[in-house]
Amino acid sequence: MPNTKRAIQFMPFNGLRGYENLVNQAEHPRPTKREITEDHAAILNHKLHSLYKGETIIATYYTENGYRTTICCVKEVDSIFHILRSDKGNIPFSNLWDIETGF
């Protein structure tokens, strides 16, 4: 028997594949997403419509790991698919929390 097959024979068996990842996820619950009020949504909508291509903004938005704030350059405000496209990636309107302009 070749040495490679012999080594596979003695590898540890993992009967609960993925169990360790589930335990780690349970220990660190995801942060909850804040609810947007109508007034906050109206202000955010006004800010989105006033953005132009190439403008530098500070965007605060929700991700799986909580809220993230980043400085980015606007590529496009896609009102059909409800996405803010920037040089750092796409941000869905539903995940946006705040936009700061004027830099």
Image: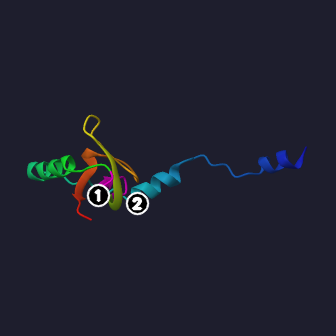
Q: Which residues are magenta?
A: 54-66
**Local crowd size for mark 1, using a 10 Å CA cut-off: few (<14), some (14–19), many (≥20):** many
**Local crowd size for mark 2, using a 10 Å CA cut-off: few (<14), some (14–19), many (≥20):** few
In this view, which residue lies farthest toward the left? 39
2 or 1: mark nearer the eye: 1
The Cα atoms of the two marked residues, 2 and 1, are separated by: 29 Å
Q: Nearer the viewer, residue 25 or 38?
A: 38
* Amino acid type of the residue that numbered disc 1 sits on in the rendered structure: Ala
Q: Nearer the viewer, residue 67 or 98?
A: 98
In this view, which residue lies farthest toward the top? 80
Q: Residue at x 35, y 55 (%)?
A: 73
Q: Nearer the viewer, residue 66 or 78?
A: 78
Quadrant for the N terminus, please: top right
Residue 46 appears in the picture as rendered:
yes
Residue 68, position in %: x, y?
33, 60
Residue 45, position in %: x, y?
16, 47
- Which element is circle 2 on? helix
Q: Are marks 2 and 1 in contact (CB under 8 Å)?
A: no
Image-quadrant location for residue 92: top left
Image-quadrant location for residue 67: bottom left
**What is the chief secondary structure element of the magenta stretch?**
strand
Residue 71, position in %: x, y?
34, 61
Q: Report the side of 85 relative to 52 (left or right).
A: right
Q: Report the side of 92 relative to 10 (left or right).
A: left
Q: Residue at x 33, y 53 (%)?
A: 54
Q: Which mark is residue 27?
A: 2
Query: Which comes sooner in the sequence, label 2 or label 1?
Result: 2
* Amino acid type of the residue that numbered disc 2 sits on in the rendered structure: Glu
Q: Residue at x 35, y 58 (%)?
A: 72
Q: Which residue is tagged 1?
A: 59
